Amino acid sequence: MQHAFEWAVLRVVPRVERGETLNAGAVVYCQGAGFLGAVVELDEARLLALDPYADVAAVRDHLEAVRALCAGEPVAGANARRPAGERFRWLSAPRSTVVQASPVHTGVTADPAGELDRLVTVMVRPPRPRQAGCREG
């Protein structure tokens, strides 16, 4: 069965005043399938290329907190007991912090967990080399 879903990319903004970002995870919420999940993958070398003085441990802690909140783990505190939709809205709300969410996007899927994996592959992991003969636009 197909369900509407919402998603956002988790971005690290090591120096908010500069506006440079590094995609470091994704969050998917699918009310119809009862799914809220996040995958985080921080590429430390890419982060340090943006800001050699970035507090990598703190960034990892913030990203892990997002993942734990999505999973409803007790370590995430009282907010982990909120309904999944409320948790997604809180995580995807605009903010000026080191870890931010992209604008929310929507889609339709029968497999929200598969969509989360696909988004991480496409939006977070470094791109693969282009195939010979492929040209843009």
Image (cartoon, rainbow, N blue to C red):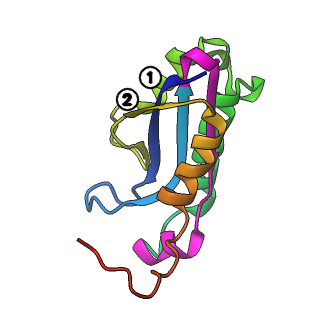
Alpha carbon distance from label 1 to label 2: 6 Å
- Between residues 111 and 22, which one lies in front from this camera angle? 111
**Vertical placement of 99 versus 106: above or below?**
below
In reply to whether residue 98 is colored magenta, the answer given is no
Q: Position of residue 37 (x, y in %)?
A: 63, 33
- Amino acid residing under circle 1: Arg
Q: Position of residue 66 (x, y in %)?
A: 59, 37
- Residue at 76% across / 23% down in the picture? 74
Q: Position of residue 48 (x, y in %)?
A: 50, 74
- Between residues 101 and 113, which one lies in front from this camera angle? 113
- Residue at 49% across / 82% down in the picture? 129
The mark total stands at 2
* Marks 1,2: beta carbons within 8 A: yes
In reply to whether residue 38 is colored magenta, the answer given is yes
- Residue at 44% across / 88% down in the picture? 132
Name the outermost residue toward the bottom: 132
Q: Which mark is residue 93?
A: 2
**Vertical placement of 97 versus 129: above or below?**
above
Name the outermost residue toward the right: 74
Asked if residue 91 lies left or right of residue 36, the reply is left
Position of the N terminus by quadrant: top right
- Amino acid residing under circle 2: Ala
Q: Which residues are magenta?
A: 30-50
- Between residues 79 and 112, which one lies in front from this camera angle? 112
- Residue at 63% across / 19% down in the picture? 33
Q: Which mark is residue 89?
A: 1
